[in-house]
Amino acid sequence: RRMLYQNISDQAEVVTIDLVTSKIVRSFPMPGLEATHPLQYDPVYDFIIVGGAYGILASYKPDGTQADSIAVPARIDQCTLDGTRHLLACAGGSKITLVKEAPNGKLAIVGQIDVARGMHTVAIDSKTGDIWGVWAAIAGDGRESATQLADGLAHARRLDDPPALAHGLAFAALGAHFRGDLATCRALGDEAFEAARVQAVPQFHLTATAIGGWAHYMAGDRTSGLDMIESIHGASQQ
């Protein structure tokens, strides 16, 4: 069965959503974790790995059985999983922390590097093992960010990895939105919407729906744009 595991941050619990029925089928609490944010699921080892705001990373079976927990830098915002090597790269606390996951769910820090204070977004190329980090320049640079988003999208296309492509398209469309580039935003938003829908990547499907709805509305197609935006509210109520 196709399942989505989602943090409920203010309740420190994980809910399991059946993607066929769009219904919550299970939830479990995570005692000791607060303000949970990063969540990754390893389908090979069948463990959910979740981080809290105050320096704890823990692993659970989908039924809620805890396997392990370790101390990590506080305020980790995002972790990404290399499913081939069973490594997580986690960004936050001015560091990238590399965590190894064992088949029994045990976790161990195997590497750490100091990075820019504002770095919260990280990704691993599962083919090369390269780790990519993104952060904003303090003064901001719209042209540089547009180039970086374009480079990231081109890399996602080369990888031929559908979730990575949906991710790249959604964020490239968001970047075009902030630059006020309506035509690019609409084109990338529509492509992201379709890629996320076909590959059943719910989080990027909702992002693409919001961005695409805005672009359609601003381009004069107000009915279609509002319908797309309102559909997000309907999806969130299911």
Image (spheres, rainbow, N blue to C red):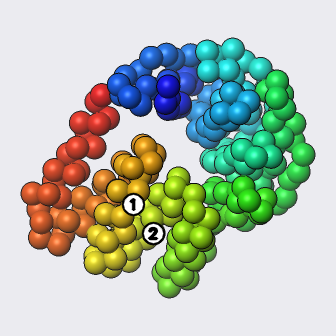
The location of residue 206, given as percent across then percent down, is 36, 48
Front-most of 168 and 58? 168
Q: Which mark is residue 192?
A: 1
Which residue is located at x 43 percent, y 61 percent?
Answer: 170
Q: Which residue is mark 2?
A: 172
Toward which corner of the image does residue 115 lie, by quadrant? bottom right
Front-most of 180 and 60? 60
Which residue is located at x 69 percent, y 23 percent?
Answer: 60
Q: Amino acid at mark 1?
A: Ala
The location of residue 184, given as percent across then percent down, is 34, 76
Q: What element does badge 2 sit on?
A: helix
Which residue is located at x 52 percent, y 55 percent?
Answer: 162
Q: In the displayed structure, does residue 193 sit left or right of residue 54?
A: left
Which residue is located at x 20 percent, y 65 percent?
Answer: 216
Callout 2–callout 1 Cβ contact below 8 Å: yes
Q: Examine the rendering and report whether any part of residue 10 can be seen.
A: no
Toward which corner of the image does residue 54 lie, by quadrant? top right
The location of residue 151, given as percent across then percent down, is 57, 77
Q: What element does badge 1 sit on?
A: helix
Q: CA distance from mark 2 to mark 1?
A: 9 Å
Q: Which mark is residue 184?
A: none
Q: In the displayed structure, does residue 106 sit left or right of residue 224?
A: right
